[in-house]
């Protein structure tokens, strides 16, 4: 097979040129980083699980009318996606106080918020993704006001839908991060959901025990990292037990 041209390598994913113009292949790695890449590691099997979870969630979101970059899954670690111009803003939606919100404002992690909060961060590794306001985004032209309106309303709809979806499998959606991009298509341009949604980008707690089933297991050295991700996948029904493994190991359902 001809060697594919790599377009971009991020911390957890690689983008290759796709088979058709206007597409990329998004490849999920097992690499993990935290604290602006000061902590690095490998979580064996993470890429396979995140590929499946993200595919599942984006497909469900497409069903409720959220436009996404996902075209289709290609194999265990890769999906075909639409080429977009990434808007350099990370959108964080929060339902429960955790992570940087707890640290920055000295609040107790685990306290439910009276209403969901949407925050914006400027995508810059060099600057450590600083928090920004809507004013910065429109002032510096990172997104047009109408684009930001769409991003905001899509983010809240995604939160409503995913909160319900996860609650249905006994998981609390504490917070998560989204990225959006501009898709140039048929002489038109549309803001669509890009990147991934997975335990790397969400905080997911077991509703009964508050056990963390997400990247905080890696960030905070809680152990059993891949087991947390597997549990999320299993509950969403995208992972099945390997019939021959006999040791409780699971594989991504095909
Ligand atoms: N998040 C992410 N990528 C980032 C920063 C945050 O996916 O570069 C996710 C993170 O996993 C969590 C949510 O966004 O689900 C909120 O993260 P927070 O602001 O609390 O930052 P953290 O303390 O996790 O760095």
Image (tube, rainbow, N blue to C red):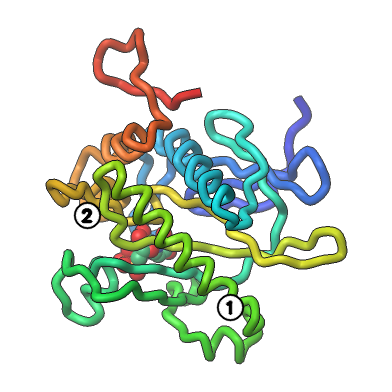
**Lower position in the chain sequence, tag 2 or tag 1:** 1
Query: Is residue 203 visible in the rendered structure shown here?
Result: yes
Residue at x 35%, y 75% (from the top left corner): 117
Looking at the picture, how far across and down is residue 77, in whole percent?
A: 54, 34
Q: Which mark is residue 220?
A: 2
Q: Quadrant of residue 145?
A: bottom right
Q: Residue 123: tell me if it is visible.
A: no
Q: Quadrant of residue 146?
A: bottom right
Q: Is residue 87 left or right of residue 89?
A: right
Q: Which residue is mark 1?
A: 148
Disc 2: CA contacts within 10 A as few (<14), some (14-19) or many (>=20) = few
Spatial CA distance of label 2 from label 1 is: 33 Å
Residue mark closest to the camera, 2 vs 1: 1
Residue 220 lies left or right of residue 45; in this view the side is left
x%, y% of residue 193? 58, 59
Quarter occupied by residue 75: top right
Mark 1, ligand 1, within 8 Å: the answer is: no
Q: Is residue 227 above or below residue 249?
A: below
Looking at the image, which residue is at 81% across and 42% down?
20
Q: Where residue 208 sits in the image (x, y, percent)?
A: 14, 47
Q: Which one is nearer the viewer's eye here, 86 or 236?
A: 236
SS for dot 2: loop
Quadrant containing ligand 1 reads bottom left
> In the image shown, does 5 or 131 lie closer to the viewer?
131
The numbered dot on residue 158 is none
Q: Residues within 10 Å of mark 1 (few under 14, many from 20)?
A: some
Left or right relative to 64: residue 232:
left
From this view, report whether residue 51 is shown above or below residue 97. above
């Amino acid at each position: 097979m001809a060697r594919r041209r790599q377009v971009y390598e991020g911390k957890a994913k690689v983008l290759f040129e796709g088979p058709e113009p206007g597409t990329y292949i998004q490849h999920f790695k097992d690499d993990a980083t935290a604290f602006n890449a000061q902590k690095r590691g490998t979580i064996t099997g993470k890429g396979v699980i995140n590929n499946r979870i993200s595919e599942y969630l984006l497909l469900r979101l497409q069903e409720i009318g959220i436009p996404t970059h996902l075209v289709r899954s290609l194999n265990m670690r890769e999906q075909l996606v639409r080429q977009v111009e990434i808007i350099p803003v990370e959108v964080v939606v929060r339902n429960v106080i955790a992570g940087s919100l707890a640290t920055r404002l000295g609040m107790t992690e685990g306290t439910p918020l009276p209403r969901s909060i949407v925050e914006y961060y400027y995508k810059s590794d060099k600057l450590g993704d600083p928090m920004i306001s809507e004013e910065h985004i429109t002032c510096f032209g990172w997104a047009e006001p109408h684009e930001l309106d769409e991003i905001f309303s899509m983010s809240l709809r995604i939160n409503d839908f995913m909160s319900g979806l996860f609650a249905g499998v006994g998981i609390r959606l504490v917070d998560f991060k989204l990225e959006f991009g501009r898709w140039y298509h048929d002489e038109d341009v549309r803001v669509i959901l890009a990147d991934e949604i997975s335990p790397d980008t969400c905080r997911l707690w077991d509703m009964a025990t508050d056990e963390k089933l997400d990247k905080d297991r890696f960030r905070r050295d809680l152990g059993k990292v891949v087991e947390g991700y597997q549990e999320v996948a299993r509950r969403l029904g995208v992972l099945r037990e390997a019939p021959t493994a006999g040791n409780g190991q699971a594989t991504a359902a095909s």
